[in-house]
Image (cartoon, rainbow, N blue to C red):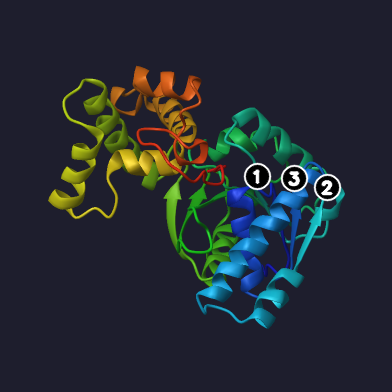
Amino acid sequence: MSIEKVAVLGGGLMGSGIAESVARAGLPVVVRDIDGTAIGAAHKRISTSLGHAVERGKVSEDEAAEIHGRIDYTAELGAIADADLVIEAVPENAELKANILAQVAGIVSSDTLIASNTSSIPIAQLAAGLPRPERVLGLHFFSPVPVMRLVEVVVALDTSEETLEAAKELAERIGKRAIVTKDRSGFIVNMLLVPYLMAAVRMYEEGFATAADIDEGMKQGCGHPMGPLTLADFIGLDVLYAIGDSLYEEFKQTEYAPPPLLKRMVASGRIGRKSGRGFYEYSEVREPSRA
């Protein structure tokens, strides 16, 4: 099974990064978003990212123009019909993702692979009722996608070996390192990462240490490039809350449960770097994540 054209549903931070990575590998890609405003924002994200790549000497101006020339933007869902692979990258909401995937299945060929970029929702839950479930899987990229090399390939109960091999081949083709995981909430990375981050939030919530000292302890004591509360702000506290909630619902283990402080911060709009304030305050507001 050869993947020669990709469609990405959602042009936010994750979707635009996935599209850019695919286009850099020489493949045509369609980015579909809900309206002209969202499409314009996706176009700007990719233009800015490619501009930074030119500044860093990663690509030439001509190469950047060629990469962007492989990307089409549309608000029409029907424009994805001839894709060999469709990657859903809409916000981390199970009902929204399931509805989108059901629409996709009614448009594309029966041979088209269908993937979700979910960071925590089981693929079986999203794919329930879709025709030919053997072609459905998870492709969980990491932000910022053009920089981060990892992608988790999530194999659901019905995912075929042919689908798995095609996904791994595509990951390699676009310069990513694929790791394969079975289908359960959180997969590999978030299942290990989230308890660590939640423990740091609880430590701070209980007044055990300052945010700066918690982060400095993990940086200097464990060699981490970034402390847990800084990382939580970078991910987005709303995204972290959603992932933790999904993990807790699946396993009912307290280490995954979001602490009350995290819920209050999200409710107050203090969701990290993208809002300008989380555990720390930021002078520059970062692009919201769709994780």
Q: Say what secondary structure mark 2 lies in.
A: loop
| Left or right of residue 82: residue 133 | left
**Percent x, y of residue 174:** 56, 70
Callout 3 crowding tier (Cα within 10 Å): few <14, some 14–19, many ≥20: some
What whole-number distance in Å separates the C-alpha atoms at marks 3 and 1?
30 Å
What residue is rendered at 55% in x and 59% in y? 164
For label 3, the SS is: helix
**In this rendering, the label closer to the viewer, 2 or 1:** 2
* Quadrant housing the N terminus: bottom right
Instruction: Name the residue tied to disc 3.
Output: 38
- The residue wearing badge 1 is 133
The answer to whether 207 appears left or right of 1 in the picture is: left
67 vs 235, left or right, is right
Amino acid type of disc 1? Pro
Q: Nearer the viewer, mark 3 or mark 1?
A: 3
Q: 143 and 139: which one is in front? A: 143
Q: Are marks 2 and 3 in contact (CB under 8 Å)?
A: yes
Amino acid type of disc 2?
A: Ala
Whether residue 33 is visible here, answered yes or no, is no
Which of the numbered marks, if any, corresponds to residue 75? Answer: 2
- Label whose residue precedes the other's in the sequence (3 or 1): 3
Q: Earlier in the sequence, mark 2 or mark 3?
A: 3
Q: Earlier in the sequence, mark 2 or mark 1?
A: 2
Depth check: give the residue in front, 188 or 36.
Answer: 36
Residue 28 visible: yes
Q: Is residue 101 above or below residue 143?
A: above
What is the residue that sits farthest to the left in this orientation? 221
